[in-house]
Each structure stands twice: as structure tokens, then as C-alpha cells.
Image (spheres, rainbow, N blue to C red):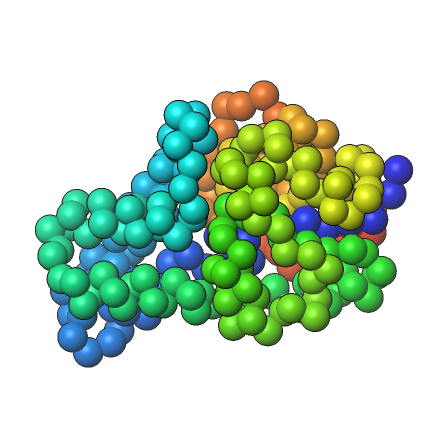
Amino acid sequence: MAITTCIFDAYGTLFDVGAAARQAAAEDGFEALAEIWPKLAADWRDKQLQYTWLRAVTGTHTDFWQVTGDGLDWALDASGLDDPAMRERLMQLYWELSPYPEVPEVLGALKDKKKATGILSNGTPEMLSAAVKYAGIARLLDHVLSVESVGVFKPAKAVYDMVGRTFDVPTDEVMFVSANGWDAAAAADYGFTTVWVNRTDAPMDRLPGTPSHILTDLAALPDLVADA
């Protein structure tokens, strides 16, 4: 069956999660970040994700803003940084993450092909609204879905269930796109056609599902959808 609906993960897929640390490192007063911001950004992201999985497994859900702050606190501690002003600035910048350069054009091309588009993310509704507005892509998305509607983080099945319920579309008409290998694998195991945007040339996760396609960025996605 043809793909009618393209669903995107948000952070790391549409929005650059390294942008906050990179921008802060270039600002006056945060010179301590100049040499270490890539490590800080990587630690921050790793812990942010780890905390979502642990909270899902233990049934201790909180929202993504909380785990984002918790992950940053761990990353700052790991780098020996104790600067409340730096922490506040980094968290503030998370509301203004840059989209990857190809994002607006890709979404526009999908809309030109009459495809339904949306986001399915761990982010809170407020975080996602801010990110979409900052990126200027609201008009290119039909729905922005947050896990807060079901109270558990990815890769819980209840999260992927939201797509069919919201878009009223069968699973085999959905192409799910994520820069997280584990997310693409879980969505594949769920039944979606999946695209792993492997921006960092990472190895394949050893999980039950296997992504249908692997790209290095989103640029080729509209042609891929047309051929699916």
C-alpha cells in the first residue's frame, strides 16, 4: 500500500539537539564551554534519553522538560561545571533549537506530494510548540503529537498507537522517520515503514525491528516516499 502519512521524531531528527550547547559556548560569560561543548551536548542527550527509558520501565513518568533538566545536571556535573547561570542559559536555549537546514524544504516537498505530516515526540506540548514556531514549520505539519497524551515515553506501543488514532490511517500507510536508531527499530517492529536518519554514522542497534531505509540526512526523503 502507498505511503500517505509521514511522521517525524522531533529532537535530533528535525531539531538539532547540539545547538543549545554550541550557541552557549559562543556567548560571552560561558568560555568554559568553548572546548568541551560537544562532550557536554553528547552527555546531555545520552542522559536525557536514558532517563526516559528508565522512567518508562519503572512507571515513574515525568515530563520531558524535567528529564531534559536532569540530564543537563548530570552532564554539567560530569564536566566539573557548577554555574547556575550557564545551566539557566542552556535550558533557555533548548526552547530555540535550530532545525536542520533541509527540514523546511523536505516538509514542503512532502506537502506538495499531498502527504499528511506530523511529529511524534517525547517532548511536552509546550516544548514542541516552541520548537515548531522557532523553526517556522507549523504550516507544514498536520499534527504535533506528544507522549504526554499517554503518559509514557517511547518506545512504548501506546506512543506509536497515537498515529493511527490521530491520522485515521492504517499502519502500512505510515512512514516513520527518526534519527534515533532504537526509535526507528521500535517503530519498525510496531509495523511502520521506517527511516533511520543516521547523522552520526552509528552502528545498527541490536533490536527486534530493523529500519526499512537508512539516510544520512532528510534530503532524499521525498523521493523515497514517492517510491515506497
Please state the horizontal and vertical placement of residue 52, each as a whole percent of the image: 41, 38
Near-viewer residue (199 or 186): 186
Of 215 and 100, the residue lying toward us: 100
- The location of residue 34, given as percent across then percent down, is 20, 66
Q: Quadrant of residue 21?
A: bottom left
Up the image or down, 161 lies above or below 97; here it is above
Q: Is residue 121 left or right of residue 49?
A: right
* Percent x, y of residue 215: 61, 47
Work out whether residue 86 or residue 66 is closer to the camera in this orientation and state it.
66
Check the image and report above or below for 226 versus 87: above
| Residue 160 seen | yes
Instruction: Specify the quadrant of the image occupied by residue 132.
Output: bottom right
Quadrant of the frame with the C terminus: top right
Is any part of residue 44 visible from this angle? no
In this view, the residue farthest toward the right is 1
Residue at horizontal 27 percent and vertical 68 percent from the top: 89
In this picture, residue 207 sits left or right of residue 105: left
Give the residue at x 70% y 66%: 140
User: Which residue is situated farthest in the top direction here?
Assistant: 208
What residue is drawn where x is 30% and y is 52%? 69
Tell me the quadrant of the picture where the N terminus can be found: top right
Total labels: the figure holds 0
- Relative to residue 211, is residue 82 depicted above or below? below
Residue drawn at x 43%, y 28% as measured from the top left: 59
Q: Nearer the viewer, residue 196 or 46?
A: 46
